[in-house]
């Protein structure tokens, strides 16, 4: 039996596991996916490589600055740019060959069991659990496992809602016309809020496009057939497509792309006294919805578990 089971091998789960191992605990990391990273997601499409989740990350805390510097030294991370349009001089980082590279680097010394879906924590015995799935999924696991948090906190956590995002991924037979540095942020656009040219970004050998639809557009079109969504998004991005033709195209629907209103603290933890188990929740819905927020949430969850266990 492990001391701690971590559910989810995204940034928060890998960070929590790293800190728990450093504190001397045995840790088992489980993830339902085929690879680590969560929304640090990079996909091959034809001859292209495409980031379709988080597009970049920034650093502010000393801990994440140090982690990013180490990952950069090891060749897993590179600076993409210092802003979009006019820029602001503040570095935006990417994975060397895609955003998933950061997660792969973080998982180097962590034993991760992939393709493993967690429903009942009793199937994975441990003294403590760190749940890093989106809050509704984590609460569902805790409920099935009969280890829910106290009623008042449970009700408050259950009210945390998420924005959905529809992402379009496409490769082309001719260069795209996305302005340097290969990314456009347009937060007030009713259809597309981010455009990325993955070739200009430095991760794809062929022209490869990522479009992130706005939250409201994604809600409205969540159940719209794929071919209609693809047609409308490509039409809305026609000014950056150039003269090329689409080679391959896919959609990714992110149901839990980010919290509407984050939980105010970096983690939430409790002890199920009937079973003698400690549970902590972490992820980008806690305190800060960015990649760095997920990192800091993982550290906070690890510290909460360490404190409980000792």
Image (cartoon, rainbow, N blue to C red):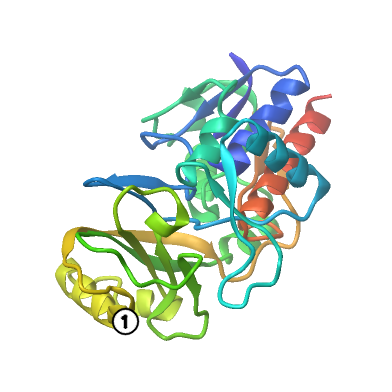
Asked if 191 appears above or below 224 in the picture, the reply is below
Figure quadrant of residue 47? top left
Asked if 308 appears above or below 180 in the picture, the reply is above
Q: Nearer the viewer, residue 170 or 276?
A: 170
Instruction: Please identify the quadrant where the N terminus is shown.
Output: top right
* Number of other residues with Cα within 10 Å of mark 1, as a class: few under 14, some 14 to 19, many 20 or more: few
Figure quadrant of residue 68? top right
- Using residue 296 as the reference point, say whether residue 215 is left or right of it: left
Q: Is residue 57 visible?
A: yes
- Using residue 35 as the reference point, say whether residue 19 is left or right of it: right
Instruction: Please identify the quadrant where the C terminus is shown.
Output: top right
Where is residue 262? Give x, y as percent: 65, 64
- The number of discs equals 1
SS class, disc 1: helix
Q: Nearer the viewer, residue 10 or 248?
A: 248
The residue furthest top is 1
Q: Nearer the viewer, residue 117 or 176?
A: 176
- Using residue 87 as the reference point, say whether residue 43 is left or right of it: left
Where is residue 96? Give x, y as percent: 51, 42
- Using residue 55 as the reference point, say whether residue 115 is left or right of it: left
Say which residue appears at 25% left-offset and 75% top-offset: 234
Q: Is residue 146 visible?
A: no
Asked if 264 appears above or below 103 in the picture, the reply is below
Say which residue appears at 79% left-offset and 36% top-offset: 303
Which residue in the protein does label 1 denote?
Answer: 239
Where is residue 258? Give x, y as percent: 53, 63
Say which residue appears at 51% left-offset and 31% top-offset: 121
Where is residue 119? Give x, y as percent: 43, 36
């Amino acid at each position: 039996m492990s001391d701690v089971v971590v559910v989810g091998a995204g940034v928060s789960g890998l960070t929590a596991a790293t800190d728990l191992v450093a504190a001397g605990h045995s840790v088992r990391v489980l993830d339902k996916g085929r690879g680590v990273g969560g929304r640090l997601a990079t996909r091959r499409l034809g001859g292209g490589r495409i980031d379709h989740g988080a597009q970049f990350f920034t650093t502010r805390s000393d801990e994440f600055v140090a982690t990013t510097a180490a990952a950069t030294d090891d060749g897993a991370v590179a600076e993409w740019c210092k802003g979009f349009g006019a820029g602001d001089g503040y570095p935006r980082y990417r994975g060397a060959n895609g955003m998933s590279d950061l997660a792969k680097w973080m998982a180097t010394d962590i034993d991760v069991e992939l393709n493993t879906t967690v429903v009942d924590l009793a199937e994975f015995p441990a003294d403590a659990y760190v749940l890093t799935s989106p809050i509704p999924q984590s609460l569902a696991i805790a409920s099935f496992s009969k280890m829910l948090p106290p009623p008042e906190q449970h009700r408050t956590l259950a009210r945390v809602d998420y924005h959905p995002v529809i992402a379009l991924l496409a490769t082309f037979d001719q260069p795209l016309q996305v302005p340097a540095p290969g990314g456009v942020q347009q937060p007030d656009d009713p259809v597309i809020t981010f455009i990325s040219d993955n070739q200009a970004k430095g991760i794809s050998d062929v022209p490869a496009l990522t479009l992130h639809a706005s939250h409201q557009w994604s809600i409205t079109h969540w159940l719209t057939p794929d071919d209609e969504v693809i047609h409308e998004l490509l039409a809305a991005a026609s000014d950056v497509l150039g003269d090329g033709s689409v080679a391959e195209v896919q959609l990714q629907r992110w149901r839990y792309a980010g919290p509407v209103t984050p939980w105010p603290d970096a983690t939430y933890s409790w002890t199920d006294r009937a079973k003698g188990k400690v549970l902590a929740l972490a992820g980008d819905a806690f305190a800060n919805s960015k990649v760095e927020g997920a990192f800091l949430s993982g550290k906070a969850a690890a510290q909460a578990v360490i404190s409980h266990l000792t």
